[in-house]
Every structure is written in C-alpha cells, then in structure tokens.
Image: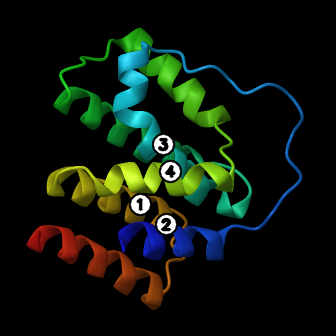
Amino acid sequence: MFAGRFGQYVRDKHAPREMLAGPEVPFPLAQNMREAINHHLIPLALLARANGDVAGIEQKIICDHAIALLAKAGHPVSDADMGKLNDYVAGLRPSLMQLDPALHRIEREDADCKIAFVTAARAVANADGRITAEESRLLEALKLEFAKA
C-alpha cells in the first residue's frame, strides 16, 4: 500500500526532463553502506528533482537522513565519507523505473525506518515552502500508518 501511494505521489510531482547524457555516477562508499541507504536515496532524489534540480537544503536533508540510517546500521561515516556522499547526492539522477523496487524495500523495513523516511520526504517536499495541504495530509497519513504498525 505504501509503495503504491507514495510512488504515485512522486510520479504526480515528477515532470519528465531531458536527461543529461553520461554514465551513472558510481556509489562512493562501501557496498554494504550502499545496501543500507540507496533504496532511500532513490525516492528522495526523485522527489527533490521534481522541480528540476536538488537545492542545497534538499541535498542536506537527504544526506542527513542517509547518515542517520548508516549510523543505525552500524556504519560510522567519516568527514571524508560525508563529502563523498554529498557529491553523490548532488549528482544522483535516478529514473522512475528505480522507484518501485526502492519503495518495496522500504516497505519491508521496521516502523522507525519508515517513519524516518516519510519525515525526510516531507522535509524535502517542504524545502521550497510549497507543500500543498493534500500532500501534507498524505505524508502525515503514511507516517501515522507506520506508527500504528
């Protein structure tokens, strides 16, 4: 249910744009760190890029969320790693095809991870100060749904 509702929310906000040509930027940290966070980065980056580019505040929200997830998973992040992660998030341009698999992985996580994800998504959506009442209700409903689980 979450993947369908949140996925549609992202798709509704997404405006297809001409993609920049070039290879995918490789994940700069260890593979186990990628496994811990990449499924969160994909939908958050798609949401942040809905208006064309990732603003600095959106990038910070995404990176802070990723660092919290890494800490929870027992992967401390050095200052050098944080710099690499910031650069990676700034250049991350996931496709809509990556959205559903990422959301399905989030669905299988514990309630705390799901609530943290929705909190980060709300912060990204509200970063430009233009979150609608409908968007706010949807994100709050998802958060409450996870809190009850």
> Of label 2 and label 3, which has the lower sequence position?
3
Decide: marks 2, 3 in contact (CB < 8 A)?
Answer: no
Nearer the observer: mark 2 or 3; the answer is 3
Decide: marks 3, 1 in contact (CB < 8 A)?
Answer: no
**x 30%, y 61%: residue:** 119
**x 33%, y 12%: residue:** 78
Whole-percent x, y for residue 114 in the image: 26, 57
Horizontally, residue 75 falls left or right of residue 31, namely left
Local packing at callout 3 (Cα closer than 10 Å; few below 14, some 14-19, many 20+) is many
Q: What is the C-alpha distance between the residues marked 1 and 2?
A: 6 Å
Q: The residue under label 1 is which amino acid type? A: Ala
Q: What is the C-alpha distance between the residues marked 3 and 1?
A: 10 Å
Number of numbered discs visible in the structure rendering: 4
Q: What is the C-alpha distance between the residues marked 4 and 2?
A: 21 Å
- Quarter of the image containing the N terminus? bottom left
Q: What is the C-alpha distance between the residues marked 4 and 1?
A: 17 Å
Q: Which residue is mark 4?
A: 101
Q: The residue under label 2 is which amino acid type? A: Ala
Q: The residue under label 4 is which amino acid type? A: Pro
Q: Which residue is mark 2?
A: 125
Local packing at callout 4 (Cα closer than 10 Å; few below 14, some 14-19, many 20+) is few
